[in-house]
Image (cartoon, rainbow, N blue to C red):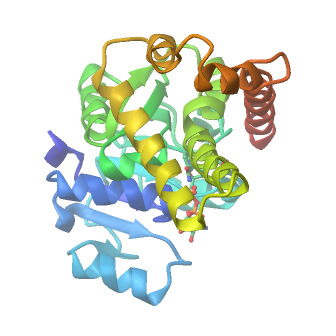
Amino acid sequence: MLESAAPLLLVGAGKMGGAMLERWLELGLPAAGVTIVDPYLDEGAKQAWSGRGVRVEAAEAAPPAVIVLAVKPQSMETVLPAIAGRAGPATIVISIAAGVGLGRIAAAFPAGQPVVRVMPNTPAQVGKGMSVACANDRLDAGGRALVDALLGAVGEAAWIDDEGHIDAVTAVSGSGPAYVFLLAECLAEAGRQAGLPAGLADRLARQTVVGGGALLAESALPASKLRENVTSPNGTTAAALAVLMAADGLQSLLTKAVAAARARSLELG
Ligand SMILES: NC(=O)C1=CN([C@@H]2O[C@H](COP(=O)(O)OP(=O)(O)OC[C@H]3O[C@@H](n4cnc5c(N)ncnc54)[C@H](O)[C@@H]3O)[C@@H](O)[C@H]2O)C=CC1
Ligand SMILES: O=C(O)[C@@H]1CCC=N1
C-alpha cells in the first residue's frame, strides 16, 4: 500500500519529516517517487537523500499523490502559498505542524482538497511512533486507507473526529517522548547524587526506561498494576513513591506540563 503514496512531496526534511521518510523508504515507499523541498538542508543531508534515490528540490512531472508538510508552524505562512500550486485535485495534503488547524491549511488549497492534520512523535523513527490524525470531510475511504498505511508504517495510528482534541494530543504524545527522555536524564542525575559513578548511573537510568517501556509494550497489565508489582509493602519503592505520588508530586507536575504544552499548541495556530 505504501507504493500508492508515491509520488510523495515532503516539504521540510528535518527531525520529524526526515524520520518518517526514513521509515517509509525502509518499508517500501519507492525512493524515485519522493521529492523533498527544503531550501535549508545542508549539503551533506542533500547528498544523503539523493544517494538513496530521493529527488531533492526537483519539479514533479505530475501532481503528487501525497504532500507532507513537515515545517515549523511559524514557516507555514510562507510555505502554504508556495506549495499549494503543486497539488492536484486528488492530492492528499498531510500536515504534521503543531497548532496549525485544518481550516487554515485547507484555505491555502482549492476548495475540495483532502487535508489531514497528523500529530506524530519521534519514536516513529524506529516504528514505535504514536500518530493521531484528523481529516476534513474531503478525505474519502481510499485516501484514509493510504494515510493509515503511511502512519501504520511508523507505529500506531488513531483517528479523531474532533479537531479540538489535537492540542491535548500534541501535549501528551507529540511532546511526550521528551518527558520520557527527561525522566531518564533526571533518574541518572539522582543516581549520581546518590553516589553512583556517572557512567553507571546513565546506564541504569537508560536501561530502566527501556525495560519499563518494553514491559509496558508486551504486558496486557495496566501501568498501575506493573507499578504495584515493583512495590513491596513498606519497601524501597514505596518510600520513593510516597514522594512521587504526593500532592505536589509527578501527577501535579505532568498535569501542569501538559497544560502548558496544550496552551502553546493553541497559540501556534
Ligand atoms: N520534532 C518532533 O518531535 C515533532 C515535530 N512535529 C512538527 O513537525 C514540524 C517540524 O518539526 P521538526 O522536524 O522538529 O523541525 P526541524 O526544524 O527539524 O524541521 C523543519 C524543516 O523544515 C525546513 N524548512 C524551513 N523552512 C522551509 C521552507 N520554507 N520550505 C521547506 N522546508 C523548510 C527546515 O530546513 C527543516 O529541515 C513542526 O511543525 C512540529 O510542530 C510534530 C510532532 C513531533
Ligand atoms: O515541540 C514542538 O512544538 C513539537 C510538536 C510536538 C513535538 N515537538
Image quarter hosting the N terminus? top left
- Residue at 61 percent across and 30 percent down: it is 172
What number of labels is visible? 0
Image quarter hosting the C terminus? top right
Q: Nearer the viewer, residue 268 or 194?
A: 194
- Residue at 33 percent across and 57 percent down: it is 21
In the image, residue 232 above or below residue 132: above
Quick check: 28 left or right of 56? left
Residue situated furthest bottom in the rendering: 43
Q: Residue 140 lies in what quarter of the image?
A: top left
**Where's residue 4, x and y in %?**
17, 44
Q: Is residue 154 visible?
A: yes
**Where's residue 189, x and y in %?**
68, 55
In the image, residue 133 above or below residue 77: above
Q: Is residue 114 visible?
A: no
Q: Nearer the viewer, residue 211 or 62?
A: 211
**Where's residue 207, x and y in %?**
42, 48
Quick check: 101 left or right of 15? right
In the image, residue 254 above or below residue 194: above
Q: Quadrant of ligand 1?
A: bottom right
Q: Residue 56 lies in what quarter of the image?
A: bottom left
Q: Residue 43 lies in what quarter of the image?
A: bottom left
Q: Nearer the viewer, residue 120 or 111?
A: 120
Residue situated furthest front in the rendering: 234
- Residue at 61 percent across and 34 percent down: it is 170
Quick check: 164 left or right of 4? right
- Residue at 28 percent across and 34 percent down: it is 152
**Where's residue 188, x and y in %?**
61, 53
In the image, residue 8 above or below residue 132: below
